[in-house]
Amino acid sequence: MVADFFLDKVHAARCTFKKALKPDRKRQLIDEVCNVWKVSIRKACKVLRFERSLYTYKFKRGDQAALQQRIKEICETRIRFGYRRVHILLQREG
């Protein structure tokens, strides 16, 4: 009984994986590898298993801080409104 519990605990400890890194952090790691080891971006991406197209990708989404603030203001004043009604109010405002 105790041996089974111990084996399960050891097995669980071996099978745990770390959380995957976000693309921005992986880009930083690739830059560090390129600078420290003096290798190309292609080789660094291959070693870290990161697509080169994701390394060079630029985000197109703009800053939406003003929109988020306006949604919070509407939700504070009109507590019972759902997302559909809030969306309609935002459309009417322009």
Image: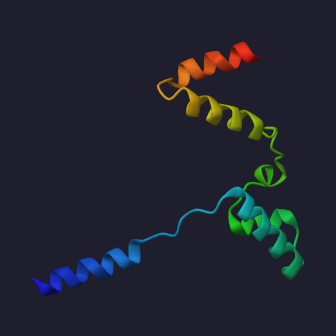
Q: Is residue 77 left or right of residue 43?
A: left
- Place of residue 3 in the rendered image (x, y in percent of width and height, measured from the top left): 16, 86
**Residue visible at 16% across and 81% down?**
4
**Residue visible at 74% across and 17% down?**
93
- Place of residue 38 in the rendered image (x, y in percent of width and height, measured from the top left): 90, 78
Q: In the image as oriented, which residue stretches furthest toward the left?
A: 1
Q: Is residue 40 left or right of residue 4?
A: right
Give whichever of 59, 93 is nearer the camera. Answer: 93
The quadrant of the picture occupied by the N terminus is bottom left
- By what rule are the colours in the image chosen? rainbow
Q: Residue 47 falls in which quadrant of the image?
A: bottom right
Counting the numbered discs, the total is 0
Image vertical order of residue 86 relative to residue 57, above or below? above
Image vertical order of residue 58 relative to residue 29, above or below? above
Give whichever of 22, 44 is nearer the camera. Answer: 22
Give whichever of 49, 2 is nearer the camera. Answer: 2
- Place of residue 65 in the rendered image (x, y in percent of width and height, measured from the top left): 75, 41
Q: Residue 71 falls in which quadrant of the image?
A: top right
- Place of residue 10 in the rendered image (x, y in percent of width and height, measured from the top left): 31, 82
**Residue visible at 80% across and 43% down?**
59
Q: Residue 26 falls in which quadrant of the image?
A: bottom right
The quadrant of the picture occupied by the C terminus is top right
**Residue visible at 70% across and 67% down?**
48
